[in-house]
Image (cartoon, coloured by chain):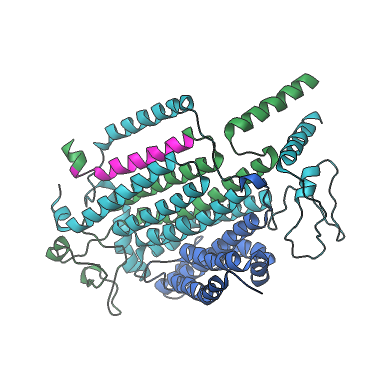
Chain colours: A green, B blue, C cyan
Amino acid sequence: MLSLLLDQYNYAVVIILMMTGLYVVFASRNLIKKLVGLSIFQTSVFLLYITIGKVSGGQPPIVESHGSDHANSETLLFASIGEVDSVAQSSSEVLYSNPLPHVLILTAIVVGVATLAIGLSLVVRVREVYGTIEEDKIEEYDRIYYKEILERQ
Amino acid sequence: MHDPHVILKVISKFLVPFIALFAFYVQFHGDFGPGGGFQAGVILAAAVILYALIFGLDAAKKAFPPSWVRVGMSLGVLLYGGTGVLTWILGGDFLSYGVLAHDPAHGQHYGIIAVELGILCSVTNVMIAIFYAFGSRQPEVDEDNW
Amino acid sequence: MMLASYATAPTIILDLALMAILIIVAFSIVRMRSLFAIVMLQGVYSLVSAAWFVSLDAVDVAFTEAAVGAGVSTVLMLAAMLLANRKSDPVPISKQIAPLLVVIFAGLAMFYAIGDMPAYGDVNSPANTGVGMDYIDRTTKEIHIPNVVTAVLASYRGYDTFGEAVVIFSAGLGVLLLLGLNGNAGRWTASPSGQNIYPPMAPSANSRLSVSSDNSKSVTSSAVKEPSSSTTRKSKRKRFKDKGNN
């Protein structure tokens, strides 16, 4: 329990945020609020990935190299933004955070907004046909619709 | 003729070119600092969206016609894929940019620039297309809900 | 707790503050009913998480999240909200219990699993010793550009990014198919020789399509507005039932 508070609090926070988003998706009956919940859930997943890739005392993965000799990573001098961490100084090697989650999440964000746009346009079309975006009313109208079809048969 | 939004209009007219310029900075400085095609595309789209929000959708459609949008969003993907096909033709694998120049590192540079341009084109035009689609839809909200 | 964490104590305070803001914003989204407030709070949530991304060294991600999450997606949500509704109906308590139970159960299961996760900021965690760190060394040797994220995005994982570009393209295509670039898809309109053809079956669609934003001047507002909202609602229901009778 102590380790959870000291070492792994990031996961606790991310799980709380994720479950909040999931609750909004489940519990709210309004389609736009559902999409907002979905986007909270999505952002929390992004946070989960990025916190996993974080290295304590690390720098953003932008390798600053001097001169034309880029080839040797050991000779890299540190000249970036931010303060130099004591760990980095002592080992004379700059620590970088893991760039791989950044790449995955970077593309996921843009794809996320594109799919959000699809969802929103579906909501707009639902609103135009049903006149409402509340799920309960949509279900009620559907019930009327299918009842009429069954009666005609 | 009294225009209630004169400050907004003047300021945003001043801002829009700088937002677009910043987008291109983000695009072409993306190799050296934070940035790249995705971010630049969204920022460039945001410039058009700001223009549309302030001056109206019709003015924005005159500045950035929907026909460009339709062509641009496919052109971006084609540019990306075309880079891959070009590396095929030059004898490499799909999207292995080393064959684009004599020095493989330079080839990587050219390839990354071409690919990022494709992403810029595609993302910008898709975002603008989505905004145009939502913006020009006539609202059906009832009067008492407003 | 790791030694390095003490050295970055101010960052921890910043992190905790940002986490607290995120949780408060998320909880208030749960309780709100005004869609406008919800959408704006979603933008706030994106912006605060972008601030946390900067603190987590993910500058590229923060950039994207600030531009996309707080900018474009908020604008899109506002546009969709204008086309849909302003308020959400209250949900009865009886319908909130089951989701709450599911969420609590799932959350507890995930809390139980936290013990197996590596510590926050651990250099030697499996995620941070694998291919990700290898990319940093290889980028300086093979590609010679400082930003490792761009190198991985465009070169090492170029296939992935190609897939993402295609996904974005198809998402844009989907929106255009659903709504139309000029906002008139699905409204049963066609203008073969400069004049509109409305099928007689959809009276309310006809009346509502007063101004089409097509850049051709031929589209004219042909319709009278419905006198009051209640008749609009009725005619919409009628249209709905008419379709059911076909």
Q: Point out the residue furthest to the bottom here.
A: A67
- In the rendered image, residue C170 lying in the magenta stretch gets the answer no
Q: Quadrant of residue C60?
A: bottom left
Up-down relation of residue C107 to residue C68 (above or below): above
Q: Quadrant of residue C233?
A: top right
Q: Residue at x 27, y 52 (%)?
A: C17
Q: Residue at x 60, y 66 (%)?
A: B52
| Residue B141 visible, this angle | no
Q: Is residue A91 left or right of residue C182?
A: left
Up-down relation of residue C180 to residue B22 (above or below): above
* Number of numbered labels in the structure image: 0
| Residue B55 visible, this angle | yes
Q: Is residue C91 left or right of residue A128?
A: left
Q: Where's residue A25, x and y in %?
A: 48, 37
Q: Where's residue A54, x and y in %?
A: 28, 53
Task: Check the picture and name the quadrant holding the C terminus of chain C.
Answer: top right
- In the rendered image, residue A14 lying in the magenta stretch gets the answer yes
Q: Is residue B40 left or right of residue A51?
A: right
Q: Which secondary structure dominates the residues rendered in magenta?
A: helix
Up-down relation of residue A29 to residue C44 (above or below): above
Between C90 and B12, the one lying in front of the other is C90
Q: Quadrant of residue A146?
A: top right
Q: Is residue A96 left or right of residue C59?
A: left
Q: Which residues are magenta?
A: A6-26
Between C38 and A120, the one lying in front of the other is C38
Q: Where's residue C106, x and y in %?
A: 37, 31
Between B3 and C49, the one lying in front of the other is B3
Q: Where's residue C172, x and y in %?
A: 60, 54
Q: Residue at x 36, y 67 (%)?
A: C147
